Amino acid sequence: MDRESLEKRPAIFVVGSPNVGKRTILSRLLKVDFDDASDTLPELSVNGWTINTKYYTADVTVWTANLSNELSIASFPDVNQIVALVMVFDTSDLPTLVALKEWVSRTDIQKFDILLCVGNKVDLLPDHPSHVEYKRRLMKLGESSVRSNVDFSDYGISETEGSSLLGNEEPSLGFKRSCIEWCLEHNIEYVEACASNAEFDQCLSVDGDSQGIDRLYGALSAHMWPGMLLKSGDRINEPSLPEQEEFRRRRI
């Protein structure tokens, strides 16, 4: 599809510093392969995506950009088409979160219906509690010959990862708390992810609710997108509140 047609669709804007994993996240989400070097390119990139759920389909556009001092929402072809803002940072590289905060401080993000902040690469945090569940999954996925004394270094993780759950408070806990407080202050939903490792990503949860790419997809697909086509055959051109629908029925 040509770029002009994509610009007319409701849009998702994905932004973050170079090398925080934006393209890897989109590769998992959109099921599209990206060039490894594309995450460092300065210009805006655009892709079409059809959100396909049990109940509806919706054609949207996904814009991706690297953070820079020059990046402005106003530079988009049609800023009014942007429905969702997905901000990505690397949890093992805190300056990437600082850069996001600085960008948000000079950007009016409250105009968007969906605000998400993705803390990616949590597998690089050695004290993250999901390392424990990840080890359990590796053992379950292995053959029956896998013993309890398996050498986890074969999987790129150490025996001490996740052990902080049984000892002192995690060093990353303070950082995570401050990040969540910042997100709450700006009405942003915080999501942790490990886009490069699907198995680890599936180990992420909060109070039993999935995190990772599954949560990102869930947050985006829960919205009533303009132009969404219900699988019953009805089309919703503009989202409306339940009370508005009731008012229309009464008038009819």
Image: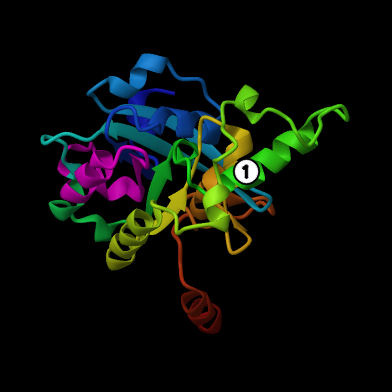
Is 121 one of the magenta-colored residues? Answer: no
How far from the left and from the top, in percent, is residue 203? 62, 46
Q: Is residue 152 left or right of residue 31?
A: right
Magenta range: 74-102
Please tell me which residue lies in front, 225 or 196.
196
Q: Amino acid at mark 1?
A: Gln
How far from the left and from the top, in percent, is residue 194? 50, 38
- Rendered-image quadrant of the N terminus: top left
Is 79 one of the magenta-colored residues? Answer: yes
Residue at x 32% of width, y 46% of height: 81
Name the quadrant containing residue 41.
Answer: top left
Number of numbered tags placed on the structure image: 1
Please tell me which residue lies in front, 203 or 75.
203
Q: Is residue 40 visible?
A: yes
Q: Is residue 114 visible?
A: no
Would you name the residue on which mark 1 appears? 202
Hey, which residue is sitting farthest bottom in the picture? 250
Residue at x 52% of width, y 52% of height: 164
Please tell me which residue lies in front, 217 or 207.
207
Question: In this picture, is 134 found above or below 236?
Answer: above
Q: Is residue 218 left or right of residue 115?
A: right
Question: In this picture, is 140 found above or below 80?
Answer: above
